[in-house]
Image (spheres, rainbow, N blue to C red):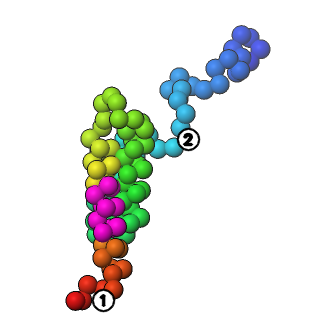
């Protein structure tokens, strides 16, 4: 039926899918970043903190201007706190005597 004026090259995608779906959307990145930030306070803060920062930054649209979704901002801030605490903990663990005296 493509020969009767209904060609397939004119509309390659359906109307509902006009955006690129190559990765998770911003809301999902914000939630993932928040979960990583909270989990980073308990385990692997040096890894999960920067992951939360990156997820929060990408969820904010890589900009500070405009409206920022709340999960993205929470992920960014908690990830920064988590990373800072992990760095302080690692610096304290590297001192001579390992904090004993």
* Residue, disc 2: 22
Q: Main secondary structure of the magenta part?
A: helix
Numbered circle sitting on residue 97: 1
Name the quarter where the C terminus is drawn.
bottom left
Where 79 sits versus 65, above or below? below
Q: Residue furthest right?
A: 3
Q: Quadrant of the N terminus?
A: top right
Which residue occupies the foreground of this view, 56 or 23? 56
At x 38%, y 66%, the residue is 46
Question: To which quarter of the image does residue 18 belong?
Answer: top right
Residue 80 in magenta?
Answer: yes
Q: Is residue 92 visible?
A: yes
Report crowding for label 2: few under 14, some 14 to 19, many 20 or more residues within 10 A (C-alpha). few
In the picture shown, does residue 94 fall above or below 51?
below
Label 1 vs 2, first from the N-terminus: 2
Helix, strand or loop status at disc 2 = loop
In the rendered image, residue 14, in percent from the top left (x then y), is placed at: 57, 25
Can you give x and y, in whole percent of width and height, for residue 8 in the image?
A: 70, 21
Q: Left or right? Give the position of 11 relative to 49.
A: right
Residue 88 in the figure: left or right of residue 9: left
* Image: magenta residue range: 79-88
Q: Residue furthest left?
A: 101
Can you give x and y, in whole percent of width and height, for residue 55 in the image?
41, 49
In magenta segment, residue 24: no
Is residue 46 shown left or right of residue 2?
left
- How many numbered marks appear? 2
Quadrant location of residue 35?
bottom left
Residue 82 got which mark?
none
- Residue 60 lies, in percent from the top left, at 37, 38
Residue in the picture at 38% in, 51% down: 53
Task: For the residues labelled 1 and 2, say whether their Cβ atoms are less than 8 Å apart.
Answer: no
């Amino acid at each position: 039926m493509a020969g009767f004026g209904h060609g397939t090259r004119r509309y390659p995608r359906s109307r509902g899918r006009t955006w690129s779906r190559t990765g998770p959307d911003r809301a999902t990145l914000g939630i993932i970043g928040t979960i990583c930030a909270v989990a980073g306070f308990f385990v692997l803060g040096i890894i999960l903190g920067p992951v939360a920062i990156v997820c929060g930054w990408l969820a904010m649209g890589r900009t500070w201007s405009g409206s920022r979704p709340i999960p993205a901002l929470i992920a960014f801030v908690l990830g920064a706190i988590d990373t800072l605490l992990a760095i302080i903990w690692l610096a304290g663990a590297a001192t001579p005597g390992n904090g004993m005296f």
